[in-house]
């Protein structure tokens, strides 16, 4: 099933794909736990907390 979603999004303009993903996430995210939402967002932005720790090492 995942390959189908990726193929569908690849055929769309990037802006349209983001709009579609956004509206789907608005429906999906409220149905999962807060921990799952947080993990999703952290993975999406690349674990910004790791960058803060890494930058502190250079002080």
Image (tube, helix red, strand yellow):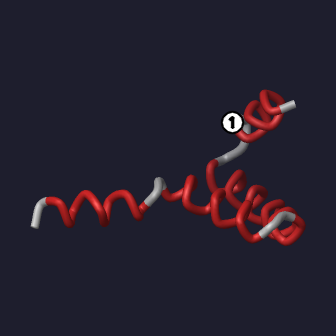
Total marks shown come to 1
Q: Residue placed at 85% from the left, 71% from the top?
A: 30
- Categorize mark 1 by other alpha carbons within 10 Å: few (<14), some (14-19), many (20+): few
For this rendering, which residue is in front, 6 or 52? 52
Q: In the rendered view of the protein, which quadrant contains the N terminus?
A: top right
Name the element at disc 1: helix
Q: In the rendered view of the protein, which quadrant contains the C terminus?
A: bottom left
Percent of width and height locating residue 29: 80, 66
Q: Residue placed at 41% from the left, 62% from the top?
A: 48
Percent of width and height locating residue 49: 41, 64
- Note whether 19 is above or below 7 in the view shown: below
Q: Which residue is mark 1?
A: 10
Percent of width and height locating residue 16: 71, 55
Q: Residue 12 lies in what quarter of the image? A: top right
Q: Residue placed at 12% from the left, 60% from the top?
A: 58
For this rendering, which residue is in front, 38 or 14? 38
Position of 31 compared to 36: left or right?
Answer: right
Position of 13 compared to 32: left or right?
Answer: left
Q: Residue placed at 78% from the left, 28% from the top?
A: 3
Position of 13 compared to 49: left or right?
Answer: right
Q: Residue 28 lies in what quarter of the image? A: bottom right
Position of 11 compared to 56: left or right?
Answer: right
Percent of width and height locating residue 45: 50, 58
For this rendering, which residue is in front, 30 or 2? 30
């Amino acid at each position: 099933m995942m390959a189908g979603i990726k193929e569908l999004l690849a055929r769309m303009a990037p802006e349209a794909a983001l709009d579609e993903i956004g509206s789907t996430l608005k429906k999906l995210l409220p149905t999962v736990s807060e921990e799952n939402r947080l993990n999703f967002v952290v993975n999406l932005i690349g674990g910004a907390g790791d960058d803060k720790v890494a930058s502190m090492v250079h002080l």
